[in-house]
Amino acid sequence: MTNAIEVKDLRREYHAQMGVIRRKTKLVVAVDGISFEVKQGELFGLLGPNGAGKTTTVKMLTTLLIPTSGTAKVLGYDVEHEANALRGRIGFIFGGDRGLYWRLSGEDNLRYFASLYRIDPDVSKKRIPYLIELVGLTGRGNEKVEGYSRGMKQRLHIARTLLHDPELLFLDEPTIGLDPVGSRELRGMVKNLQSEKKTILLTTHYMFEADELCQRIGVINKGKMVALDTPQNLKQIVSDLSVIELEVIDLRPDTVEKLKAQSYVEAVSVEEHDPHAILLIQSPRGSEAIPDLMATLNGQSVSKVTVREPTLEDAYVRLVEGARSN
């Protein structure tokens, strides 16, 4: 199987202005020499925390940014020197609802963008109804976009991106801001696109989404690729751990740091659900660690304790936390 994307030692630097009175210039390395490949027809996930370099990578691959060094080929085209030839063969979908004309109908938006893509009117006349149906907007295409829900706007984004039938799609956090129903519908749409042999590169913060959709995943942190494998293999990274979930009422500010300092604790993360918080604690000791954890909490009210097997999200936490400590 040939590769749709080939990235070799890709790097992107920029200079940021720091300070108010005494301005200083700081060199920032957004992407630091990453290498990876995406096969044709593959659904590839790119994961990482905020500021890790995901969006910068996608912008270089879609010709919106020029790399500082290294090489990247998309569909066989060099992203820096053959950008014009490449742009007509790829599609790029941002999360959020920008980029549409709200006072036009959904169909009018698609007709306008079809003219920008220089699609033959006879072709777009047939393709627009097909895309309206494909993205689940049947019967709503004549309505103004300002009356669409956020999920409907995101579906229209996908229809717009598919107008010129691109071979490769870049989806940059496409479900951000959507409610659970809208997110589920969008994931189903992504699966349908991949069944049509589209190559897809997906960035997301949602681990369950990556686990459900992606055939392989690259984890990027501080501009470096820290892992690259299938979701199943990435989970093996934490096969030696269990995850203890503690639901704590009125969590004290210093509790997390105290837990992280314990020798039997691998990592700690917090989910806030005011007035309680859920502590997710990775430990090789499993349930045997609970008495010591309760002692560290020192009388704080715990309403629920659960021990479970680790997930892809737990593997991600271990990878990112490990990269931060190096």
Image (cartoon, grey):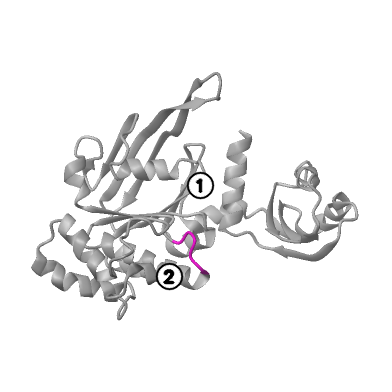
Figure check: 240 above or below 223: below
- Rendered-image quadrant of the C terminus: top right
Numbered tag placed on residue 19 in the rendering: none
Which stretch did the figure color magenta? Answer: 175-179
Determine if residue 205 is in view. yes
Q: Mark 1 points at which residue?
A: 48
Q: Is residue 178 magenta?
A: yes
Magenta-span inclusion, residue 39 = no
Q: Given this view, does label 1 or label 2 mark the residue nearer the observer? A: 2
Q: In this view, does 23 lie to the left or right of 6?
A: right
User: Which of 38 and 108 lies nearest the eye of the viewer?
Assistant: 108
Q: Name the residue under label 2.
A: 149
Dot 2, how many residues are within 10 Å of its Cα: few (below 14), some (14-19), or many (20+)?
Answer: few
Q: What residue type is labelled 2?
A: Ser
Task: Name which quarter of the figure residue 138 lies in.
Answer: bottom left
In the displayed structure, 197 sits above or below 292; it is below
User: Which residue is rendered at x = 33% and y = 31% of the image?
Assistant: 70
**In the displayed structure image, the side of residue 107 where residue 211 appears, left or right:** right
Name which of mark 1 and mark 2 comes first in the sequence. Answer: 1
From the top left corner, tell me how far across and down residue 127 is, in percent: 18, 70
Q: Which amino acid does label 1 sit on?
A: Gly
Instruction: Indicate the position of residue 11 as horizontal and vertical percent values.
Output: 39, 32
Report if the CB atoms under discs 1 and 2 are less than 8 Å apart.
Answer: no
